Amino acid sequence: MVEPLPQVTALLPVLLLAFTGLALLLVDTLSPDTRSNTSMAVVSALGALAALAATVWFVASGTGSGDTGGAILLFADAIKVDTMGLFFTAIFASVTSLVVVAAHDYFHDHPNPATFYSLTLFAATGMSLLAVANSLAVVFVALEMVSLPSYVLVAFLKQNRGSVEAGLKYFLVGALSSAIFLFGISLVYAATGSLMLGDVAGVLGDIAAGTDGLDSRSGIAGLGIVMILGGVAFKTASVPFHFWAPEAYEGAPAPVSAFLSSASKAAGFVIAFRVFTEAFPVGASLSADINWVLAFGILAAVTMTLGNFAAAVQEEVKRMLAYSSIGHAGYALIGVAALTGADGGAAANGAVMGAAMAHLLVYGFMNTGAFLFVAMAERWGVGRTFEDYAGLAKRAPVASTAMAVFMFSLAGLPPFAGFFSKYFLFMGAIDNGFLWLAAVGAVNSVISLYYYSRVVKALFIDDPASPTTLDTIDVRPTALYAAVVFAAVATVLLLPGFGPVIETAEAAASALF
Amino acid sequence: MTAVASSIPPEWYLLLAAAVFCVGLFGVLTRRDALYFLMSVELMMNAANINFVAFALYYGDLTGQVFALFVIALAAAEVAIGIGIILVLYRNFGVTDVTVPTEMRW
């Protein structure tokens, strides 16, 4: 009989990320002369991989799942470690390890790379804390823990006007939306008298039932919920708070764009998935006339349409990827938009939300990989537009093949993993009676094929503008190559591995309803 | 609960907080100087703090008050980051006007 571990070890992934970040900062502060980019990149990658390994181990051993005694509650119930939290932590840790490995080559001549690694790890810590939050207070603190390092990371190249401008715009929209999010929390507190997700849901049920004259509070609670939705829209880069994304992703260093558009976006979705199911349950919200499901539905449809149409007219690859990431936020929003408040809808709700979680995992690899390919192109100095990428496959066949895998997977073509996650997502929406959302999503996927294939066409079919344009590619950034290739391998391996992933995700999501 | 505080209906606190929030929002939307933007965001966060403290009193629990302390600390951290970004903005563009940097299409 093995002695069970103390409960607090359930936070091991979060602690690993936090202590790796702190250790890097400490060593760099104590002995700045011995700073070595390579050793810091290795340490941060090992920290992120250790967090990933711990998370996978926890998921495999059923920590916090219904089979082993349910979610683990810590710190007066403010933290709740369950399978969904661990699933998202796995996404954050994977993206973080890819990004820090790639950053090794991207920031090879930066005077102070330690700040980059520790800020990235601190943001990842905040994300994994966000994934296990069980109180609106923890949600807000963790959200700021993600946002504050992200602002700095976007403006990391402080001599570069584009990076600074992107950081400024990200900060302006971010500070505004976190103030709105906070005011929403304060209104929910005013209406319900609690910040714990479960207690808020209890009072919301009373409001819906109209007990004790509480029915007059549904207006305040509703306004609060709408404002919280605004905060989620910012973090996930969805309409109406999406307009920072193209600027921030284009101006930021490409590894940071990869980190923000994959991990930070998933962090926004973990707020949506947890807060909106646990604090504002669908049934109670609908009977209190707070129809956030419809609000998310409209946002999902508008977001994916706007993202895909805007992506189709871009000339720069990085900006196209930024708009495509807005489009993918729209797809993942289906996970909270296609929910039904009907009795016995728990299984169907779990299926569609689980599909959205699986999509975010697949998206984490393919989108990070695509942005890291852009990072490699920036490192080579080949330019930013589609034309500049022409003929790259002749000089860099491996990386170009990886990019083609990312593009086709993002477009959702079979037989890539992106196809299966979208398929499950749209089928889940149809099963719940949201045929219109699935239809909008399918039409958008077809549009997206156009601009994704433009990249592949440029890489493999087009000829370079002049025979000498690609001669600038004289560096072989090994770590960047490794990260891109690893992301491509993961995208391909998620194809046979999609069964366990979707099963875990659906079980995790079903536990919320 | 003191006599004065309990004699004020909770709606008034909500109205006060909403008014402060709207002043902040107005400042965010109309001011072009990044420093005014920071002050306006600070107003919006403190509007939320009014709600937290007032309703902590109303419900007789301390959660709201404690969270207000957290918010004050986070707001300070956010200003520190914001000032840093405005500083590099000034170094690169020579202004603190948020409408001047247009390297990229908006």
Image: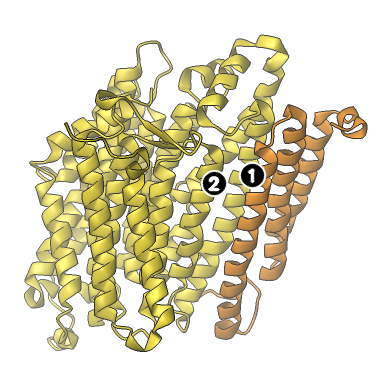
Chain colours: A yellow, B orange
Seen in the picture, residue B10 relative to A42 is either above or below; the reply is above
On the image, the x and y values in percent for residue A282 come to 47, 22
The local crowd at label 2, few if under 14, some if 14 to 19, many if 20 or more residues have their Cα within 10 Å, is: many
Asked if badges 1 and 2 are on one and the same chain, I answer no
At 55% from the left and 25% from the top, the residue drawn is A199
Q: What residue did someone put label 2 on?
A: A140
- Kindly indicate the quadrant of the structure image that contains residue A70: top left
Give the image location of residue A55, x and y in percent: 26, 46
Quarter of the image where one finds residue A119: bottom left
Give the residue at mark 1: B67
Q: Is residue A347 above or below residue A41?
A: above
Q: Chain of mark 2?
A: A
Nearest the camera: A224 or A73? A73
Numbered disc 1: secondary structure? helix
Residue at mark 1 to residue at mark 2: CA–CA distance: 10 Å
Expressed as whole percent of the image width and height from the top left, the position of residue A150 reads 45, 63
Numbered badge on residue A111:
none
Taking depth in this image into account, of A217 and A96 the one nearest to the observer is: A96
Point out residue A67 in the picture as x, y percentages from the top left corner: 24, 24
The chain that hosts pointer 1 is B
- Identify residue type, mark 1: Phe
